Amino acid sequence: MTPSRSESRRAQVLVLHADLAQAIERLKETLSLPPTRIHKDATIQRFEFCFELAWKLLQAEIRYRGIDAYGPRDSIRVAARLSLITDPEEWMDLLDARNITVHVYKELSADKTYKKAHLLIPLVEHLLATIKKDSPLL
């Protein structure tokens, strides 16, 4: 028997939730290391990965609720309307930081993103807790 669309979407939320929970722990690890160039680069990579998982989790949860969201900016806006997140401006700021490091690597830009990476942790932890509270399967 084929799972329903709703079941498939819920399964996607569960997988992304677990993946993001693991990834945010890896980000915390790199942030605890001395800020050498290699550690900063590792932190930035983990920040990018965590942000990518976070917005995809937002989008998956939104779609599970029967609403469409296209891309990270739209997902952040809709998630704020649904009270999945509480600080859309900060999410947008971190999206901009992620976009800068993903598309153009400059050491100055990388250092700015490194300094912002820790800001993602409480946002993601709040998101994970909010979705977990709403889901009996987590």
Image (cartoon, rainbow, N blue to C red):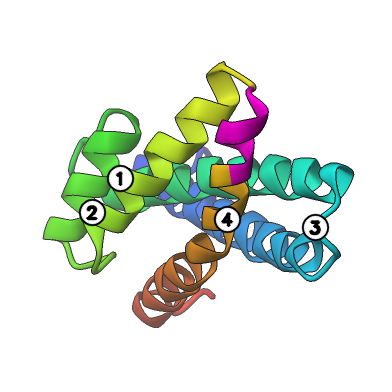
Identify the disc placed on residue 115: 4
Q: Amino acid at mark 2?
A: Glu
Q: CB of mark 2 within 8 Å of CB of mark 1? A: yes
Q: Quadrant of the C terminus?
A: bottom right
- Front: mark 4 or 2: 4
Mark 1: few, some, or many residues within 10 Å (few <14, many ≥20)?
Answer: some
Quickly name the residue at label 2.
89
Give the extent of the magenta segment.
106-111
Amino acid on which disc 1 is placed: Met
**Disc nearer the start of the sequence (1/4):** 1
3D distance between C-alphas at marks 3 and 4: 10 Å
Q: Nearer the viewer, residue 97 or 55?
A: 97
84 is higher (above) or lower (below) than 101: below
Q: Residue furthest top?
A: 104
- Does the residue at mark 3 contact the one at mark 2 (Cβ under 8 Å)? no
Mark toward the start of the polypeptide (1 vs 3): 3
Mark closer to the observer (3, 2)? 3
Report the residue marked by disc 3: 35
Q: Position of residue 57 (x, y in %)?
A: 45, 50
Q: Amino acid at mark 3?
A: Pro
Quick one: SS at disc 1?
A: helix
Q: Where is mark 1, residue-wise?
A: 92
Q: Position of residue 49 (x, y in %)?
A: 64, 42
Front label number (1 vs 4): 4
User: Quick check: 7 left or right of 29?
Assistant: left
